[in-house]
Image (tube, coloured by chain):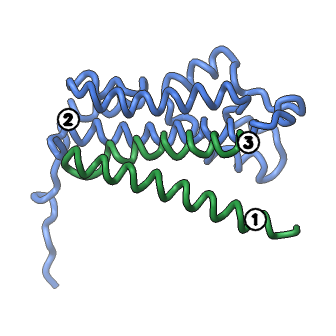
Chain colours: A green, B blue
Amino acid sequence: MRHFLVMTAFAALAAVVFGAVAKDSNHERLMYGIKVFAEFMAIGLVLAWILYFIPF
Amino acid sequence: MTKVDYSSSVESAPAKAWAMGIAAWLVPGLGHVLQGKWGRALLLGGAVWTSFILGLSMGGHLFKFSGGDQGLSSLLQIPPMVGDLGTGLLYIACWIWGYGFANGPQQAALPTFEYGWTFLLVAGLLNYLSSLDAFDIAAGRKS
C-alpha cells in the first residue's frame, strides 16, 4: 500500500508542475495535468505487473 | 555561397527575465510570486517544496561530488547532484548544515530510501522547469 501511495504522490506532484507550465488556457492545463497523472499511474502499474512476473 | 545573418532574428531576454529565473531557482515559487502569479507560484512552488520535504522525510539523501571514490564512481555523482541542485537554496542550506547527505548502511536500509532520493532529485528537476516558466513569463513569451 505504501508503494502505491508514494507512486500516487509522485504522479500528482509531477502532473501539477507539468500541467502548470504547459499549454495556454487553464482548461487545457487542467486536462493536460490529469492526462499526465493518468499516464504516470497507468505506466507505473503496467511496469509493476510486468516486473512482478519476471523471476530474476 | 551566401551567408545568412541570424543576429537580427535572435530575441534577447531582458535582465528582469534572468532575475526572475534565478529567483525561481533559488527559492521555489519566488519567481512567480515576484511577478504576481500567485496561483502558479502556489502550484509550482508547493509541488517542489512538498517533493523536497517528502524526500527528506522518507530518508532520501542528496548527492554531492565528493571526489573520494575511485575511477568513474565519483563522476557518476555529478548528474544526480546537478538534479538535486535544482532546488536552489534548499540544497545549499542542506549542504551548509550537512543535513540530508547521509548515505550509510542504516540510511540505505530504510524501506523508503530509494523513494526518498528520487523525490529529492525530482524536486530539483521540477524546479528547473518552474524556473524556465518564470523566465518565459518575465520575458513576455508566456502569459
Q: Which residue corresponds to mark 2? A: B138
Q: Secondary structure at mark 1?
A: helix
Q: Is residue B127 left or right of residue A24?
A: right
* Circle 3/circle 2 CB separation < 8 Å: no
Quarter assignment of residue A55 = bottom right
The mark found on residue A51 in the picture is: 1
Quarter assignment of residue A1 = top right
**Badges 3 and 1, same chain:** no
- Position in image of residue B33 (x %, y %): 28, 22
**Gap in angstroms between the C-alphas marked 3 and 1:** 17 Å
Q: Residue furthest front?
A: A1
Residue type highlighted by circle 3: Glu
Q: Secondary structure at mark 2?
A: helix
Residue B93 in sight in this render: yes
- Marked residue nearer the N-terminal end (3 or 2): 3
Residue type highlighted by circle 2: Ala
Eye-nearest disc, 3 or 2: 3
